[in-house]
């Protein structure tokens, strides 16, 4: 299993483009820097943006998830376009989540927490680490993703966070198994992912291995989805790449992680 080293990237020195022997080292450095920046901007402008469908976690609205992915969106500016999608089911029971605390108060309709499916028949709860009594609403969740792929696509990749990552993995497994609703993406990025439980959900994934490039991102101190769960999901993909961080249950986008995302996505640049 490959692992990206989480270390700060260092700029490498280079020659001074168009410099004369008499120019100062400072001037040479500025000229080289300017040329490098211009070259990078031209290269980025020539490359079409990768389009990535992003599946929100449990109890996240589409607008809220877009805000939560703001740092990642900024990190991937000029390289990828993120299209956010939340689950189809309103979550009206504030007590049940993947481990998050209830909201502090009511929210406007556009901020209504949503979920992909529930793990109990009568309550709007989802417990990722327990064997569910039901997978209520899962077919509607799959249809929501299928419609997004059909109407908003094409997409180069799928990114999923938490429950959205489990759903993304299931979508890829169904696509690899021949489900026409889910053409295989070029890649998948799974953040705080886990193998979905219940009613045969694990079978398509555990029959694997899934043969598409994958990046698995998870935190060492994630108290909602332990790293062991993410590693189990990672093991179902051929040639999986992992990116770990020291934090918890969120999508990291600091400088070290930015370099890892870009390194992974560079292989899909046209």
Image: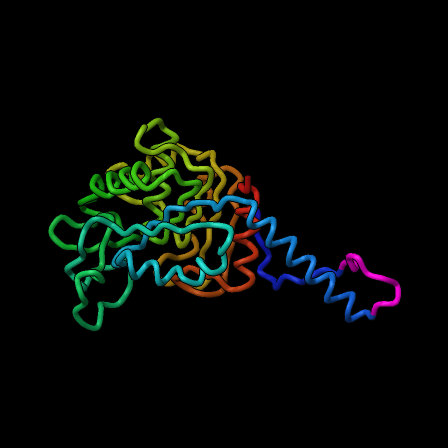
Where's residue 177, x and y in %? 36, 28
Q: Would you say 264 lies left or right of 142 here?
A: right
Asked if residue 219 can be seen in this view, the reply is no
Give the quarter of the image for residue 208. Answer: top left
Q: Does residue 162 belong to the magenta stretch?
A: no
Where's residue 201, x and y in %? 29, 39
Residue lying at the far bottom in this picture: please name it.
Answer: 104
Residue lying at the far right in this picture: please name it.
Answer: 21
Where's residue 95, x and y in %? 19, 63
Residue drawn where x is 46% and y is 41% of the image: 187
Q: Quadrant of the C terminus?
A: top right
Where's residue 225, x and y in %? 36, 57
Residue lying at the far left in this picture: please name it.
Answer: 122
Q: Would you say 230 lies left or right of 152 here?
A: right
Along the viewing direction, whichever of 229 and 173 lies nearer the viewer = 173
Q: How would you classify the magenta stretch by its main secondary structure? A: loop
From which residue to which does the magenta span run? 14-23
Along the viewing direction, whichever of 52 and 221 lies nearer the viewer = 52
Asked if residue 70 can be seen in this view, the reply is yes
């Amino acid at each position: 299993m490959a692992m990206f080293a989480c270390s700060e990237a260092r700029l490498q020195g280079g020659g001074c483009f168009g410099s004369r022997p008499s120019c100062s080292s400072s001037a040479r450095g500025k000229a080289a820097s300017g040329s490098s920046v211009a070259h990078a901007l031209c290269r980025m402008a020539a490359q079409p943006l990768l389009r990535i469908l992003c599946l929100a976690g449990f109890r996240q609205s589409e607008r809220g998830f877009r805000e939560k992915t703001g740092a990642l969106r900024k990190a991937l500016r000029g390289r990828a376009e993120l299209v956010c999608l939340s689950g189809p089911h309103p979550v009206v029971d504030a007590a049940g989540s993947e481990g998050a605390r209830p909201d502090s108060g009511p929210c406007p309709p556009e901020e209504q927490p949503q979920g992909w499916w529930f793990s109990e028949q009568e309550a709007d709860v989802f417990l990722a680490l327990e064997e569910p009594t039901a997978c209520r609403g899962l077919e509607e969740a799959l249809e929501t993703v299928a419609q997004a792929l059909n109407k908003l696509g094409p997409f180069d990749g799928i990114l999923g966070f938490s429950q959205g990552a489990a759903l993304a993995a299931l979508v890829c497994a169904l696509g690899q198994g021949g489900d026409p609703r889910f053409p295989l993406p070029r890649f998948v990025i799974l953040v705080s992912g886990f193998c979905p439980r219940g009613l045969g959900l694990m079978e398509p994934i555990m029959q694997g291995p899934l043969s598409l490039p994958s990046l698995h991102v998870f935190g060492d101190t994630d108290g909602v989805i332990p790293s062991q769960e993410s590693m189990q999901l990672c093991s179902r993909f051929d040639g999986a790449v992992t990116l770990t961080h020291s934090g918890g249950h969120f999508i990291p986008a600091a400088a070290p992680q930015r370099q890892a995302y870009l390194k992974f996505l560079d292989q899909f640049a046209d």
